[in-house]
Amino acid sequence: MTDGKMPLRAKVASSVSRTAAALSRAAGRGDGSVIGGWIGLKIDPDLLAHLAAGRSIALISGTNGKTTTTRLAAAAVGVLGPVATNGFGANMPTGHTSALAKAGQTPYAVLEVDEHYLAQVLIATEPRVVALLNLSRDQLDRAKEVAMMAQMWRTALAKHPGVHVVANADDPMVVWASAGSPAVTWFSAGQRWHDDSWVCPECGSPIERQADQWWCTGCSLRRPVPQWVVEDDGVVDPRGAWHKVSLQLPGRVNLGNAATALAVAAQFGVRPTDAVSRLSTVASVAGRYAQVVREGRNIRLLLAKNPASWLEAFDMADVAPTLLSINARDPDGLDTSWLFDVDFSPLRGRQVLITGDRAYDLAVRLEVNEVPFQHVRTFGEAVKLVPPGRLEVIANYTAFQDIRAELDRVL
Ligand SMILES: [Zn+2]
């Protein structure tokens, strides 16, 4: 894309969008990408399409891991040249518009897409690659909504047969959504959370699992053979070559995200040998996984926003003192009954502290799982109660923001 080829209205809209985002940043109102994109789209409703034209684009969607995978994939595709990306989780069309306007002319873009907006963004950006990570319930959504989302993806992809799909072979919902696409690369990133995929989306029969495999007992839907697989502390590519992946991000979940990023980059012609070293440059993603040393404690922040991501957080966390914090404000969802969907028993044997607006809901949940805990009022109090060394902090959305603010302010 060159600015010269854009219609005048799109040029004006793009420029105003950049200016509005800059003004918003200058006023200290976040990174400005939402307001900038919103104004740009008001002036030119086709601005996203105009900004996307001429770029090779990858979209990354799913319930969990999309911000991290987008960062890793952008780093990997960066082997080839400048990449536009929405690195701060502004994952709706306003955020995409703003990211592309701000980046100026880049040959590539890697965009995180909210799963509800995938159909719309497919139309606007005509991507080369779409990566589908997983589908699970978010807060109080139920499995029924998960099946509806899979149906929406499937319908949307059917209208774009030229798109290459990179999809998670371990998630039956993702496999079913992708199975109709002519070109699919399968990766195996694992699936810890199975509660939203016991029923086949094709025929309604039960799905059975054994080790890594899964299959429908009523139809032909089963786990496809993945071409990209996590093995030990590395990733096996489609030719069978193993590549060591050294990440600054914790856990096997992030190795899975790395495998996805390498599979996406391969669709742009990037060889995994050239990309792996770039993956290790990603240290924290919008504050997640950030490590801060205070009073001799090495504090690491993990965000967990829904049942599946709590299980992943337990996997990422070291066996070390752990602070859990739960709020139930608007962005978190007001009902905390989802806590009962999560098995907290992996925390047994660790020193567990709890805080947040809804710490008492957490207390009830931990009692049921027979995990001893202490309640603390503030983050600072938690720091004083644990010995020097690692302190893992696992928090849901606004609790995470509160702790980040408290880290900046108090300690
Ligand atoms: Zn079936």
Image (cartoon, helix red, strand yellow):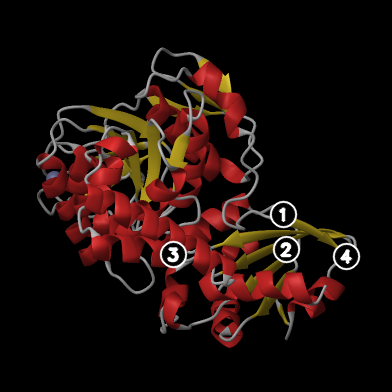
Q: Is residue 233 above or below residue 38?
A: above
Kindly identify the amino acid type of the residue bearing the numbered disc 2.
Arg
Mark 2 vs mark 4: which is more N-terminal? 2
Residue at horizontal 48 percent and vertical 32 percent from the top: 82
Classed neighbour count for the residue bearing mark 4: other residues with Cα under 10 Å, few (<14), some (14–19), many (≥20):
few
Mark 2 vs mark 3: which is more N-terminal? 3
Kindly identify the amino acid type of the residue bearing the numbered disc 4.
Pro
Residue at image mark 2: 350
Residue at image mark 1: 319
Q: Is mark 4 on a helix, strand or loop?
A: loop
Determine whether label 4 and label 3 are within 8 Å by CB. no
Query: In whole angstroms, how far apart are the C-alphas of marks 1 and 3?
Result: 45 Å
Q: Quadrant of the N terminus?
A: top left
Q: Which of 183 and 100 is in front in this view?
A: 100
Residue at horizontal 22 percent and vertical 36 percent from the top: 222
Residue at image mark 4: 387
Kindly identify the amino acid type of the residue bearing the numbered disc 1.
Val
Mark 4 vs mark 3: which is more N-terminal? 3
Whole-percent x and y of residue 396?
53, 70
Determine whether label 2 and label 4 are within 8 Å by CB. no
Between circles 2 and 3, the one closer to the viewer is 3
Q: What element carries label 2?
A: loop
Query: In whole angstroms, how far apart are the C-alphas of marks 4 and 1?
Result: 13 Å
Residue at image mark 3: 20
Q: Nearer the viewer, residue 152 or 146?
A: 152
